[in-house]
Amino acid sequence: MLHARLSHDRRVSALGASEAEVRRQTQMLDQIRDSVITMDTDGYITGWNHGAAVLFGYSAQEIVGQHILALYADGDEDEADDPFFNAFLENGSHEMTVRRRKKSGEVFWASVSLSVARDELGNFIGLIGYVVDISGQLAAEETLRLHARIFEHNGEAILVTDAGGKIVSANNAVAALTGFTESELRGRSPDGFFTQGVDALARPEIRDEIEGTGQWRGELQFQRRNGESFPGWATISSVQDAKGRPSHHFIVFSDITERKEAERQIHRLAYYDPLTGLPNRPLFYSLLEHALSEAHRNHSHGAVLFLDLNRFKNINDSFGHTPADNVLREVGRRLSMSLRKEDVVCRLGGDEFVIALLDISRREHAGHVAQKLLAAIAEPFFVDKHEVMLSASIGISIFPDDGRDTETLLKNADVAMYRAKKLGSSAHLFYSHEMNLRSFEQLKLEGGLRRALERGEFLLHYQPQLDLDSNRITGAEALLRWNHPERGMIAPSDFIPVAEETGLIIPIGAWVIDAACRQIRAWIEQGLPPVRVAVNLSARQFSTTLPQTVLSILARHGIPSEALELEITESMLMHNVESVVEMMSQFADAGILMSLDDFGTGYSSLSYLKRFPIDNLKIDQSFVRGIPNDADDSAIARAIISMAKNLRLSVIAEGVETAAQMEFLRGAGCDEIQGYYFSRPLPADEFAALFARTNT
């Protein structure tokens, strides 16, 4: 090591140099502003100027006579060998970048320029060193290198333009995104990047914001080398020189095609029906609100059509959801094709569609459009190679006559649509104020029905059924009554349709079965034999859980299954035939009697009758009313009775009101009758008394 080679005597001699000589050299070196250090041939410091004192923190008195190694950073001592004894002697000078240590212990990077000092004879007498702290410079260079790496490897495309708007630099992402390399771009204007062919920096709205805030952010349409256009999100920033004038602009941009597509998908999900592609409820509301504002300003008229497909559930039940969805798509297509471009069709959900006709000249125009839409729906649909026919009902409200806001117009069109449904298939109706009054009454009735079950306002009356051979009561039909606390007794014809429509018939129907079975149990406990009680079933009650519900009620009340008779109508047999047969078979296996009510008024096939486990046929009162005087009614009654006998079914005629009717039926072979001729429907206690009198 160099430390070991130093002569102790020379070190003592250097330290003993006269203070006057040190001051003289220091004063001379102080004339130089940079940091200057002089050394003898052995590396001992002989001169130290003010610049060196400022840089290292040592005064001349502290450092002169010390070896130069005192300024080295740890581990740098070996650097002294080559420069002192080789390079300097050969070349006369040497430059190097090294680490040095200050008096405070701080290590810094220094640029050291060494030159050889010679006497008048040219002999080597020492070294002169110029030392500059370059830590800041190196840090700045490292920062620049870091920035260059960031610039090149940034995932976003970056363009740099000069004050004249010419590209001076472009990173790798620009080439990856656009296909243009930096060499191709340098010196060009960036306007070729923009679909509009206009440099973004030249647009007034962008230029003004950059001049005001130094930056602009927003969406621009960019162009690739192959001419393909793509949306980009750009940030354009201004860089100023020392005088505050713009010297460069940075354009940082990225391809937002995927984000825009995601936004479009989100928008479609938010505002369009995913099944049909039609506007959904929120978008329809928005469009209609705008149309209403326009109509108000222009004093124009329009219409809202509420369309509901009739019996669409049958397609779902028969073919499944996927084919049914295809039908809905086709319905949406047909509706759209039947309208003007300015009109709007929307799928609210399920099988409901709403149409807004904008700016119509006459009320009748809405009616013509409704007929056109109904005709489009009436064209055959093909489902799994089957031809299927559909119909619809349409309610129409006119704005501003029937409402000045979306909710009112939709509500009124909906009211009119339900009225149209009652007219049969493919009907349309205009809204009227009277409809709303009826709807209000229906809503009140619906609310009352919901409370009636909770408050125990329902009761059953029992109409006796008389055997024509024995003149004895063989059973009764349970008929529902509603004893309303304010309106008194409400007829079934007034509330049963509402119960059917709202689905309340399901809990009400279950209550009827339970109440009838409870009454049968009570009569048995009073000493009466098990009385057969017939209960009407609604199509809404038919579900896979119905058999278990009925059987559990029978078990709970402990009555024989043959004491309960379930009545169904012809129309119920025609829907979901297989499931109905399965449920009826479960009832038959349990010993529960099945009766076909209102026979002759529907469209049942004799081949179907053979499949169903039916015990009794009931002749509808519409055929009984005309006998024996009406030849047609009499012929129909005889035919039904004859057919039933051939099928080994019992026959009950309902609505018998005269002795002549009873005698005709007795002579035709009818088994039982019920009607006002024998007895009106009776409360349970009165029925029990009549039963006891008649059957003793």
Image (cartoon, rainbow, N blue to C red):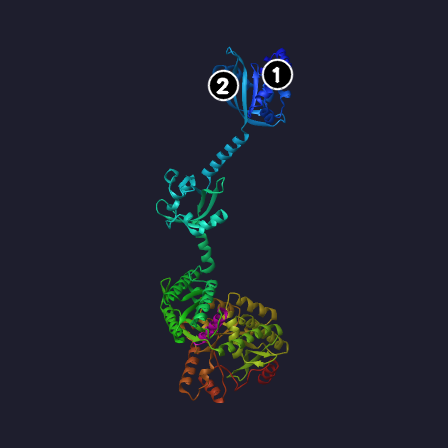
Q: Does the magenta segment cover residue 164? A: no
Residue 415 position (above or below residue 163): below
Residue 136 position (above or below residue 22): below
Q: Amino acid at mark 2?
A: Ser
Figure disc tally: 2
Most common secondary structure along the magenta stretch: helix
Query: Which residue lies at the image location 44% right of the left edge and 83% below the top edge?
Result: 623
Mark in front: 2 vs 1:
1
Q: Amino acid at mark 1?
A: Glu
Residues shaded magenta: 406-424
List x then y, in percent, for residue 294.
Answer: 44, 68
Q: Quadrant of residue 188?
A: top left
List x then y, in percent, for residue 50.
Answer: 59, 24
- Label ID, residue 93: 2
List x then y, in percent, for residue 9.
Answer: 63, 11
- Label ID, residue 21: 1
